[in-house]
Image: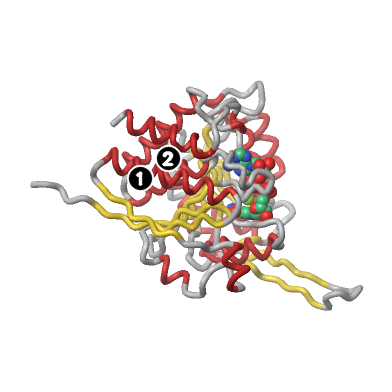
Amino acid sequence: MAVPIRNYRIAAIPGDGIGMEVVDAALRVVQAAAEVSGKYRIEITNFPWGTAYYKKTGAFLPTDFQNTLKQYDAVLFGAVGYPDVPDHLSLWGLLLKMRGPMQLYANVRPIKCLTKPRLADVSPSDLDWLLIRENSEGEYAGHGGRSHMGEGWEVATETSIFTRHGITRIMRFAFQAARERPRKHLTVVTKSNAQRHGLVLWDKIAAEVAADFPDVTWDKELVDAMTMRMVTKPQSIDTIVGTNLHIDILSDLAASLAGSIGIAASANLDPTRKNPSIFEPMHRSAFDIMGKGIANPIGAVWAAADMLSWIGEKDSGAAVMAAVERVCKAGKVTRDMGGSLNTKEGGEAICRELLEKK
Ligand code: NAI
Ligand code: MG
């Protein structure tokens, strides 16, 4: 009996700047992966949400975006931000407006060295990490405000929120993720010497959850010391978990150590699967190169590979990553990685690798 072809619906939100360029390239790779597999079809709907939409309508997203996105299996997002709109408006108007309310509480950022490591004395195998960021509360909970605006005594508060529920769910997710990796080691990052309330609770809950994962070894590191350890002892690191702000910062460092921010991917997951998860490159909208067509598409392609695995097509996700590794080895890459291809050619090189292995 013939096995029916599986159908997936993907929402694409290319957003702004190089987001549009790299999502286009990544979607071509997704379609090539579906063609190679022959077992599923991908139907893509494009949503023009972002700064242009904001300039037209006054909002980055329509109010019923959650209901709209619920009709999709996953979302591929590009980037947000435009030079003539304040960054906090675009970030809170689009990306952070989706992550928190959609309960995409686990932000997963794999780091692998697909090119030469940034530091001479680091070997590529030293940089195989999984960064896990609490993605729904903490420093980016949105609590705070401003009073006496414009006066000499103007005041602003920016309150971090750490809940037992929020910490427990990300900690369990991180221990489970560490368990599934060969080294089974987790580093819990905090700043619990100085931030003596919320992050002491992080430490306490880490120890509680660790008791349920006796096969996972774990240690703790303060975030400032962690930046040093990532540079001086990268081989001592495997899986990392930390707060919304801390992993935001550490992941830029991690991606740069591994070669280029243009290759790193980021998955915003709702592990309960009540909401579609959002997959995006780790980079932002890169004002300095937008419109030039030279952005590295690999971050977005890697995100698309993670998306394929998440919706159930693990073989395809792995095939895409194998193709990415082959183009990197062959030097068929963009300028930021020392190659000479543009975005479109970089994406096409990956598609060709995939189709040739068919
Ligand atoms: P960025 O990541 O866009 O760029 C940093 C540097 O890396 C730039 O020199 C850029 O050319 C390079 N780069 C980034 N991605 C690349 C790629 N794919 N290929 C080659 N080179 C690449 O960071 P930046 O410039 O600080 O941020 C730009 C805007 O994005 C700001 O307005 C920021 O607020 C906004 N933003 C967007 C977020 C998102 O879309 N996820 C998150 C936070 C901020
Ligand atoms: Mg960031």
Of residues 196 and 303, the one nearer the viewer is 303
Q: Is mark 2 within 8 Å of ligand 2?
A: no
Q: Secondary structure at mark 1?
A: helix
**C-alpha distance separating marks 2 and 1:** 39 Å
Q: Residue at x 53, y 30 (%)?
A: 333
Q: Amino acid at mark 2?
A: Asp
The image position of residue 44, as x and y in percent, is 37, 56
The image position of residue 245, as x and y in percent, is 65, 54
The quarter of the image holding the C terminus is top left
Query: Where 78 falls versus 58 (above or below)?
Result: above
Specify which label sits upstream in the sequence, 2 or 1: 1
- On the question of residue 71 being in view, the answer is yes
The outermost residue toward the left is: 1
| Residue that numbered label 1 is attached to | 31
The outermost residue toward the bottom is: 148
Q: Amino acid at mark 1?
A: Gln
Q: Quadrant of residue 243?
A: bottom right
| Residue that numbered label 2 is attached to | 215
